[in-house]
Image (cartoon, rainbow, N blue to C red):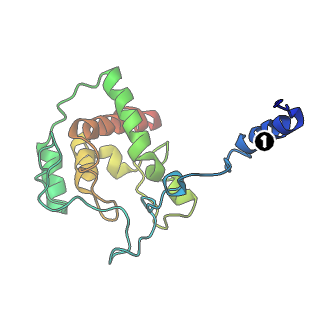
Amino acid sequence: MKKTFYPSIIAAIGLLLTTTSCDRSRNDKGYEYFPDMAHSLAYETYAENPNFADGNTMREPAENTIPREIMPYTYPNTPEGRALAAAELVNPLEASPENLLKGKEQYKIFCESCHGSLGDGNGHLFTSKRYAIKPASLLSEKMMAAPESDIFHVISAGYQVMGAHAHMIRPDDRWRIAMFVKNELQANTK
């Protein structure tokens, strides 16, 4: 029995495989085998979440838990606690170019979306109208007169509508952010 070769069938199969395996566009990659892995079912950080009574997605860590290598922050989120922290705390880091650069990087990650790249309170979350309350300007007279320890305290414990960030930012990085605000952002406005 003689085998028959069908080049047109093989060419058609090759063409079918080539056209169906290519990207359709940057947003639509064709057939997805596991769409639940390709498209997250998780809520975005600042999105409303009906699973919690307060409607917030971003959660504070469980009470009485301490992240590794981080000591609990003992100053309370009160005006008295803020004044005490500003008077007692001292930045243990040197204002070196490396620390200022790292502070700038951390500022961009954690602060810029609210306080803006200039520190004037015109960050993307406010200017895009996603956040109705204007964040504090780090260039105000009050903040210009505040020591690094006051900025460190506000980052750690929060102030008014700003939430605490101690659970997200390591202490040395909080000091670097405060150092960057004082030595770069505020120094450029004098």
Using residue 1 as the reference point, say whether residue 52 is left or right of it. left
Looking at the picture, how far across and down is residue 88, in whole percent? 11, 44
Rendered residue at 49%/42% (across/down): 118
Q: Check the image and report above or below for 141 versus 46.
A: above
Q: Residues within 10 Å of mark 1 (few under 14, many from 20)?
A: few
Q: Looking at the image, which is closer to me, 157 or 91? A: 157
Identify the residue under disc 1: 19
Identify residue type, mark 1.
Thr
Q: Is residue 64 left or right of residue 34?
A: left
Placement of the C terminus among the 4 image quadrants: top left
In this rendering, does residue 134 appear at all? Answer: yes
Where is residue 63 shown, x and y percent of the image?
A: 15, 62
Percent of width and height locating residue 178: 30, 39
Please state, as top left, top right, bottom left or bottom right, where the N terminus lies in the image.
top right
Q: Residue at x 45, y 46 (%)?
A: 112
Q: Nearer the viewer, residue 45 or 86?
A: 45
